Amino acid sequence: MAARSRLALLGLWTVAFLARCLAQWQPRDFYRIDCGAASNTSSGDRHWQGEPPQSPAFASSGISINTSAQNPELPSPAPYLTARIFTARANYSFPVDPGRHWIRLHFYPFPSPGFDPALANFSITVGPYTLFSGGIVDSVRRSGSGGVYLVKEYSVVAEGSELAIVFQPSPSSNGSFALINGIEVMSMPEDALQDDAVLLGQGTATKFGFSRLALETLYRLNVGGASVNAANDTQQRSWVSDGHGFIEGAAAGVGSQDFSSSIKFTKEVPEFIAPAAVYGTGRVLGISNTVSNTFKISWSFPVSPGYSHLVRLHFAELYYTKTYQRMFNVYINNRTAIDGLDLIVLGPRFTPVYKDFVVIPSSGVRSLRVQIGPAPNSNAQFNDAILNGLEIFKMNSTAGSLSDSDGGESSSSSSGRSGGSKAVGAIVGAAVGGIALLALLAACVFVLCCRRGAKGGKKLGWRPVPASQAGTGTSTVTLGFPGSSPATHYSATPANSCKHFSLQQIVDATDGFDNDLLLGVGGFGKVYKGEINGGTKVAVKRGNPMSEQGMTEFQTEIEMLSKLRHRHLVSLIGYCDENSEMILVYDYMANGPLRGHLYGSDAPTLSWKQRLEICIGAARGLHYLHTGAQRAIIHRDVKTTNILLDEKFVAKVSDFGLSKVGPSLDHTHVSTAVKGSFGYLDPEYFRRQQLTEKSDVYSFGVVLMEVVCARPAINPALPRDQVSIAEWALHWQKLGRLSNIMDPRLAGDCTPESLQKFGEIAERCLADRGSERPSIGDVLWNLEYSLQLHDAAMFHHHQRSEDGNSNLARQTPEIPRTSSDGQRMMMSFEENHSEDTTASVVFSQLVHPEGR
Ligand SMILES: *[C@@H]1O[C@H](CO)[C@@H](O)[C@H](O)[C@H]1NC(C)=O
Ligand SMILES: *[C@@H]1O[C@H](CO)[C@@H](O)[C@H](O)[C@H]1NC(C)=O
Ligand SMILES: *[C@@H]1O[C@H](CO)[C@@H](O)[C@H](O)[C@H]1NC(C)=O
Ligand SMILES: *[C@@H]1O[C@H](CO)[C@@H](O)[C@H](O)[C@H]1NC(C)=O
Ligand SMILES: *[C@@H]1O[C@H](CO)[C@@H](O)[C@H](O)[C@H]1NC(C)=O
Ligand SMILES: *[C@@H]1O[C@H](CO)[C@@H](O)[C@H](O)[C@H]1NC(C)=O
Ligand SMILES: *[C@@H]1O[C@H](CO)[C@@H](O)[C@H](O)[C@H]1NC(C)=O
Ligand SMILES: *[C@@H]1O[C@H](CO)[C@@H](O)[C@H](O)[C@H]1NC(C)=O
């Protein structure tokens, strides 16, 4: 009886223990010091502890300074507007529980009497680790935060019950001092970092001696989602959206929907590993299965050469529920890091998992590249891949340094190699010491093997592949600028930055609606070029005061349009509704409508690559309209005059959404469309009066044909069968001879493979029935594919002209015609109807763009 009740008690304890583990983690130590502040301060929901100027609680000495000059770029006043300065060695010393801690250091070097920030040259050390050394002004300038302030995050182990952060002014330069604005010290969960990262290229979990390792956070991304600020993370970490300039090349994939409320944390991956907002969004290759399996999404990160890096990848399957639906590879620095990852094998849909890799430096490589792509030969149902989050940490050098200005790079390759051999030593040590753990690991791997083995004798888990894997093509279309990218598609854009202008401001901007500044006249009214705020060029669209559109509709419209922000949409800057005027102010597009660059003007010819990039940009803008907002927005008037080009020839869709508002505006718009945009109109819409996104796809198909043929959509002067480009070009495309009517100026520039793909996608857009037309996302993918084919063919062409035909001969044996690889390759090119030799050469170029 007693034994049984004791057993029951034990069971209860276990339950209680488990419940505690799963409950939200709380740090044991948490200090947040506003250095140099006389009193406690708070910014938003963050509280900063001040320090009495004479007897600060944690600092050993120092001088407090402050400034009132608040730079608008600062995220908050605290802790930046006060600082502590040290002219000699000094430290901040925090009582802590032994164990791993985060240290976050905030810097905002402002001038103060007697202290020139340019002289703030110092080092920061914790125990044997040098976290930072050098001039702070330089570091701030190089930082991503607009060059105004800097937050550095480190992770170190406190050996004893005190964590001392030591500041040492540079001894060799005269008058140098150390400066610090804010310090956060916070315990890390014990299990947050485990000593079993995979050494890239070795494929096995290895021991790196993480207990004697300091890390610096370099990048922390919420892939495919919006930025998550520190207040929403259990460990107070900030996650930025991966759209911010990290994606390489044209293949950016698409951000997923937000599934954060469905994420199920586990005992192995509790919430402190990464918030649900990170696991609940991801970036996937595409929504459809038409994507070729050679596509990859690539992210590239500048790193300091000579240092090893810890890369943590976060995954959660958001869409599929069965194994063998999505299987993909992850590549780091062109090597296969994970082969054939099937997340459902690791847990049901919405289960978070993460994988750690250690990347040892190879000499001279200054960037770290992460790629995902479908696993070749996996026979998975979908050619797709997903990544949800990504963290990159710099690991200390053998000398214990994390500083860019010493250690690391100077001894670059040699220190890399010795680090490697040391690691091997550590593995041996661990193998002796940790047999039990290894046995456990082996058991896990065994279980995994068996499960997968049973499902059809596939090769398992993580397999190192030594061969270098190359990425996607070398297109120059890049995404990423703060606040707007596919990554933020599905999140509400925070800033409603639409300004109200007075009528006087508009009159001044346009010289009183001077006809000399007239850019064009549309259904809505006249468009003028103007200048506001002493130089910013804008386009001012003045609604016809006689138009039927009411003021409320006009305002609803502004509300809706001002929420749409995308790199490939013309932004609404502001409006003016004074005196019943209905005036909209937009970004000025220096290069005007696309149409003017195709025909009817003496503008220089656009190259095929430029044309492709413009089409891709416009497709991205439309894709955002169709999928980015809560309700799909149908443009209704897609045409070459509504695709505008900025000074760098980046395409932006304009005039969007005007049709969505009221029936009266609707009326104006439809009648304009019928009159002005004949030739672009979806025949199905014409027949059935039912508007869908596919109507935009049809019009976009007309735009594509216009881009190839460089002639108007409708030209009544031509013989009857040639009047409409949709009919005429479709006729030639169906014969496979689109090149016959192609813009002659493209001859020699446009590669046949690329043109063929382009023609195919235009043909599908022009399908008579909407249901047969692809989605705009699909169109986007195929255009990117066409660009890749073009790049690959151009590259091949260059190679051939450089090396002569011998190069081709050398390459041919590499093509695995008979292997399953080859079969798959032919399958993916079947739809091209191209001769298999060309196809396979292009294919090999796609896989190995460098041709090696
Ligand atoms: C700023 O510095 C001045 C002069 O040292 C001091 O009197 C004042 O209290 C400081 N202000 C704050 C907010 O610390
Ligand atoms: C400032 O904050 C610290 C820690 O949060 C607290 O112990 C202290 O009492 C506060 N001081 C004042 C004056 O509120
Ligand atoms: C920190 O400063 C105090 C006071 O000057 C000193 O006693 C202590 O040794 C210093 N700690 C370190 C790690 O330098
Ligand atoms: C900082 O001091 C070091 C010597 O300790 C010197 O090499 C370096 O150039 C200095 N940097 C700046 C920005 O003054
Ligand atoms: C350092 O500064 C002091 C006083 O500002 C000056 O007397 C001395 O010559 C300087 N030394 C060097 C090496 O510049
Ligand atoms: C972040 O936290 C704030 C308040 O703490 C909350 O209102 C907001 O919804 C959170 N955002 C996310 C994405 O969880
Ligand atoms: C990976 O390949 C790309 C393109 O071929 C190249 O630019 C890059 O330097 C390579 N990276 C590494 C780490 O080898
Ligand atoms: C990091 O620095 C510590 C202290 O100097 C050293 O013991 C350790 O080996 C270093 N780690 C690596 C990977 O070099």
Image (cartoon, helix red, strand yellow):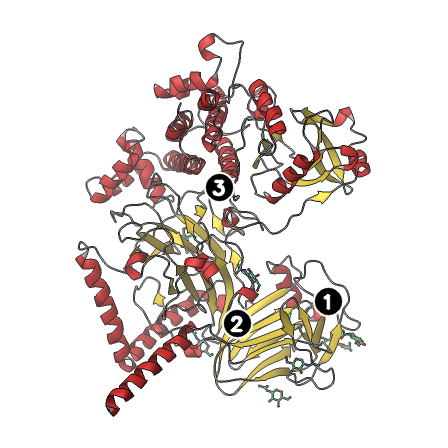
- The Cα–Cα distance between marks 1 and 2, rounded to whole angstroms, is 23 Å
Left-right relation of 731 to 602: left
Q: Is residue 587 visible?
A: no
Where 458 falls versus 418 (above or below)? above
Tell me residue 221's x, y (percent). 49, 58
Disc 3 residue crowd, few under 14, some 14–19, many 20+, Cα 10 Å: some
Q: Amino acid at mark 3?
A: Thr
Q: How much space separates mark 3 and mark 2, taking CA atoms?
A: 39 Å
Q: Secondary structure at mark 2?
A: strand
- The total of numbered circles placed on residues is 3
The residue under the point 27% across, 53% down is: 323
Pick whichever of labels 1 and 2 is earlier in the sequence.
1
Left or right: residue 360 versus residue 830 is right
Disc 2 residue crowd, few under 14, some 14–19, many 20+, Cα 10 Å: some
The residue identified by callout 1 is: 110
Q: Residues within 10 Å of mark 1 (few under 14, many from 20)?
A: many
Q: Which element is circle 1 on?
A: loop
Looking at the image, which is closer to me, 698 or 667? 667
Q: CA distance from mark 3 to mark 1?
A: 44 Å
